[in-house]
Image (cartoon, grey):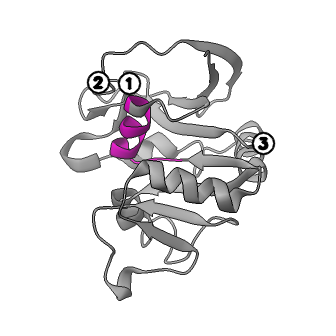
């Protein structure tokens, strides 16, 4: 049995997944994971982690998070694939990450191979999320809506294409830090 590809995104109430000026203020979106985390939020993260056999992140997310949020080590218990235009210099490489320069199709193929039937967790970067939306390469969409209005930045659904994607709501969970929504793709 093949696991699902879960596109997992945190966004502001007005639809922004990154703040203005290349993500300014974007950490506020993730308070539900860090500063304002509740037991409900923790259960959602634990479920995602436990069900995942591989992770895909974008190159920009890796560049920013590896030193800031992740402290120079992989936070993932499973192999992680970084989709990027070029492989980082050796000083920026951290064990546990494989750098993929040949696109999201190839990243999914490799991630599914190592996931061994478990889910592939696509956890972002705006560019990666939009690529997965445009290509329709996901089975479920999990959105964590933070209680904040950004007013500007990068919107999740602004550049995903012209094709309609039918979704079925499968879960809604509310916590003080976010409303957690899950949808499955209707084929």
Q: Earlier in the sequence, mark 3 or mark 2?
A: 3
Q: In the picture shown, does residue 187 fall above or below 56?
A: above
Residues drawn in magenta = 123-134
Residue at position x 58%, y 75% in the image: 96
Q: For the residue labelled by badge 1, is the local secondary structure a helix, a strand or a loop?
A: loop
Q: For the residue labelled by badge 3, is the local secondary structure a helix, a strand or a loop?
A: helix
Point out the image quarter for the N terminus.
Answer: top right
Residue at position x 67%, y 29% in the image: 175
Residue 43 got which mark?
A: 3
Residue 158 got which mark?
A: 2
Point out the image quarter for the C terminus.
Answer: top right
Q: Quadrant of residue 61?
A: bottom left
Would residue 125 be found to the left or right of residue 40 on screen? left
- As measured in the structure, the alpha-carbon distance from the residue carrying label 3 to the one carrying label 1 is 24 Å
Determine which residue is flagged by label 1: 15
Label 2 with label 1: CB-CB less than 8 Å: yes
- As measured in the structure, the alpha-carbon distance from the residue carrying label 2 to the one carrying label 1 is 9 Å
Residue at position x 33%, y 74% in the image: 87
Residue 100 got which mark?
A: none
- As measured in the structure, the alpha-carbon distance from the residue carrying label 3 to the one carrying label 2 is 30 Å
Residue 169 locus on image (x, y percent) = 66, 14
Q: Residues within 10 Å of mark 2 (few under 14, many from 20)?
A: few
């Amino acid at each position: 049995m093949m696991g699902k590809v879960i596109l997992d995104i945190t966004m502001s109430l007005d639809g922004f997944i990154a703040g203005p000026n290349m993500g300014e203020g974007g950490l506020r979106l993730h308070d539900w994971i860090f500063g304002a985390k509740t037991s409900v939020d923790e259960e959602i993260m634990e479920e995602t982690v436990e069900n995942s056999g591989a992770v895909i992140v974008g190159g920009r997310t890796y560049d920013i998070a590896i030193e800031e949020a992740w402290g120079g080590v992989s936070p993932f218990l499973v192999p992680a694939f970084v989709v990027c235009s070029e492989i980082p210099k050796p000083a920026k490489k951290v064990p546990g990450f494989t750098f993929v320069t040949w696109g999201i199709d190839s990243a999914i193929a490799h991630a599914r191979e190592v996931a061994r039937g478990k889910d592939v967790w696509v956890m972002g970067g705006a560019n990666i999320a939009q690529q997965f939306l445009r290509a329709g390469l996901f089975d479920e969409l999990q959105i964590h809506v933070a209680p904040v209005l950004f007013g500007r930045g990068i919107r999740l659904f602004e550049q995903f294409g012209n094709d309609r994607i039918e979704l079925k709501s499968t879960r809604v969970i509310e916590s003080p830090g976010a409303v957690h929504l899950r949808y499955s793709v209707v084929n």
